Every structure is written in C-alpha cells, then in structure tokens.
Amino acid sequence: MNILAYVHLRNIPPSTGHGRVARQMTEHLSKFSEDRLHILADPIDYQSMIRKVGAPWSEFCYHFFGNETSTQQARWILTERPLAENYWPEVEVVYCTNPSYVPTRKARLVVTLHDAATFESGALPADWRLLKQRLKSKYLYKILSRKVDLIHTVSHFSAERLAHFFPGLKSRLCVVPNAVPPRFFEPASPEGDVFVQKCGLNARPFILLPGGLNHRKNAELVLQAWPVIHARHPDLVLVVAGSCESAFARRAQVFTDSAILTGFVSDEALCSLYHEAQLVWFPSLYEGFGIPILEAMASGTPVVASSSTSIPEVAGGAAALASPSCAGDHVETIDSLLMDSRRRQDLAERGKSWAQQFTWPRTASKLRHHLLSLV
C-alpha cells in the first residue's frame, strides 16, 4: 500500500497534543515493511523542523507543495488542484493527520478529526477566534462529507459528537484510539530527575497538572479549588506543566510558592514529574481523548480527572472522577485520595495495567487495517 501522509511539520518538534498524535502515527505506520509511506509537506516547515529531529523524519521521502500551509489548504479547497497524484502518481491512500483536505483522482482520502470541540457550547472561549474557526471548520467538514472515504477519530465519544454535528460523516467514521509514547512506560531518567531537582521538588510532595492553565483545561476550577486543597495540605505543591494563558498565569501568581508553572517541558522532564507526583490532576472541560491520563497511568501514578466527554472512556475505571463543573467535588476527591495511600496504590496499579493496552504499534496496526480496506 502506498500512503501519502499530509503532515503539518511545524507541529512535530516539540510534539504535544495533536502534533504528538500525528508524529507517533506517522512514525509507526512507516514501520510496516509491506507499505511505502511518503510525506506531503510545506518546504519551509521542513527546513525548520529537520534541524530539530532526526530519524525517521530525516529519512522519509518528501513531496512539497509550493505555497505556505494555509494558502495551499485554501487552494486545494477552492480549486481542487493540484491533485495528490500530481505529487506522487503511485499514491493509493492520502492520509491527512490533522483536519485538512487534499483532492485526489483515484487515491482514497482518509482524514483524522480528533473531536467536535469547535462546535460544542462551552468547550472553547466564545470569542471572534472561535467564530472564525467554527466557520472554517464547518466549510471544511462539509467538503469532507462529500469527498472523504474514511474519517479516523480517537474515541467513541468523538465519533458520536462528530456524527451529531455532521450526520453525513456517520457511515465513514472509524474509531482508533490514541496511545502512550513508549517513553512513559519506562523509568524516569537522570536528565528528568535533574529537572525535578532544579524545580525544588525532590523533597516536596506535589500534584501534577499537565496541559497548562487555559479555558479548555478548566483553569477557572483549578484556581478555585487549589487554595482549599492547599489549606488542607500545606506542604503540598501544585506543579502546572504546559502552556498557560496569560490571564490565568497572572491569577496563579497569588499562590506564591505553593504553585510552580513550568511552561513546556521535555518528555524526559515530564516523565520524571509523573513518577514523582502524589497524583495527576486532569480536570479538563472537554477532551476528544486525553493522552495525559494514560501517560500518568503508564508511569504508575494515580489520576483524578473530570467525569465528562471522552475521559471516562479513556480512563476505563482506573481513575478517580469528579464533576468538571464543581470545584468542591475535585477538592473532596483529591483530599480523600491524598489521605488514603492504599487507594492511591490501587489506582496506580489498575491504571498501569489499563495503559498497557494503548501502545502506538497496536494503534497504528488498527488504523492500517482500515486503510487496507479501502484499496
């Protein structure tokens, strides 16, 4: 099978969120010796990316389009040209690793749609950027409803919501879950432990909040709940890993030394943070999947997460769940877990066993099975 993967290379280094999924899926699909996988990409993004990552990205066969990514996407949508076969005449499947459209002649088109958050009330901040994104996505998804052969999404929750907003896609939706990068199944490294020490955390108990402080990750609830949690556990520190919206970061400054905002961290540092944390807190408002839940479980750390959207599906009964709309529910859930070491150990063991099911070789094999069914 000849697969032309359209990848937004700017999201590969460093890879988080959807970029992490695109990177892992592409790398693991390329390992099937029976297939040939080529990359369709922006040449400027390639020049920037290739200096930061090594194999296999330095070894892939690339086909480049002539415009900047957004301009090229608009051209494909508006003119239906150039066709995928113009880049690689032997292509059989065009696989868009993110919401995108590439016109084809005979090749089958497969697109990954992670969730329907853009169309959900309250999932994202209601401002002009959301309106703009909603209009763009609606136009794209209507085109996909006519042109796409298969929509890959990452949870049954996302499949249900995409079908709700775009019924024309329902018969072409397939669910293949995300997975855990291999690094998080392994022990912490000296490099990561040095980061933990530099943060002054090697002798302090802490809760890890991955994903940063922003609307979708329920920053408002975190800022309400944390002072109460800290009052009950004065020695405890909240460590926020990931990008934070400036308004929430400013409000978090009042916590002085009871909260540490690390910004983006490497996988080595993140792995050590997972291993050292008392528990991982993931109170997100809306998730199409929620990879940090499984990363924490793979690292052997108990998880407290929201009881909504895809999270119960992903957690599989191996996390403590609380309402995303009730700060008090999160306070009580975290407090009871901190006071019960046996329950933390039980959740850690069940989580580690559950996470073993979510490996990228297995996930890539499942998606490849769907691709093969098209050719």
Image: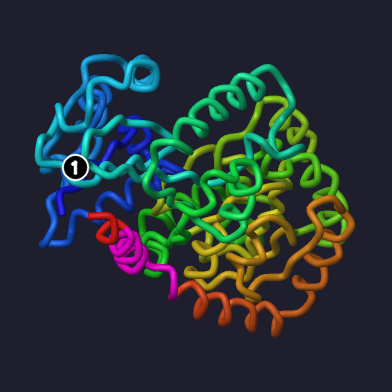
Q: Residue 281, how many percent across, how many down?
A: 67, 57
Q: Residue type at mark 1: give it.
A: Trp
| Residue behind mark 1 | 57
**Horizontal side, residue 44 vs residue 309: left or right:** left
Residue drawn at x 79%, y 62% as measured from the top left: 322
Q: Quadrant of the C terminus?
A: bottom left
Q: Residue 177, how many percent across, how many down?
A: 46, 61
Residue drawn at x 42%, y 63% as measured from the top left: 184
**Horizontal side, residue 274 vs residue 236: left or right:** left
Quick one: 245 or 255, which is closer to the camera? 245
Q: Quadrant of the N terminus?
A: bottom left
Colouring of the image: rainbow
Magenta segment range? 357-370
Q: Residue 140, how many percent across, how many down?
A: 48, 29
How many numbered marks does the figure carry?
A: 1
The quarter of the picture where residue 332 lies is: bottom right
The quarter of the picture where residue 64 lies is: top left
Report crowding for label 1: few under 14, some 14 to 19, many 20 or more residues within 10 A (C-alpha): some
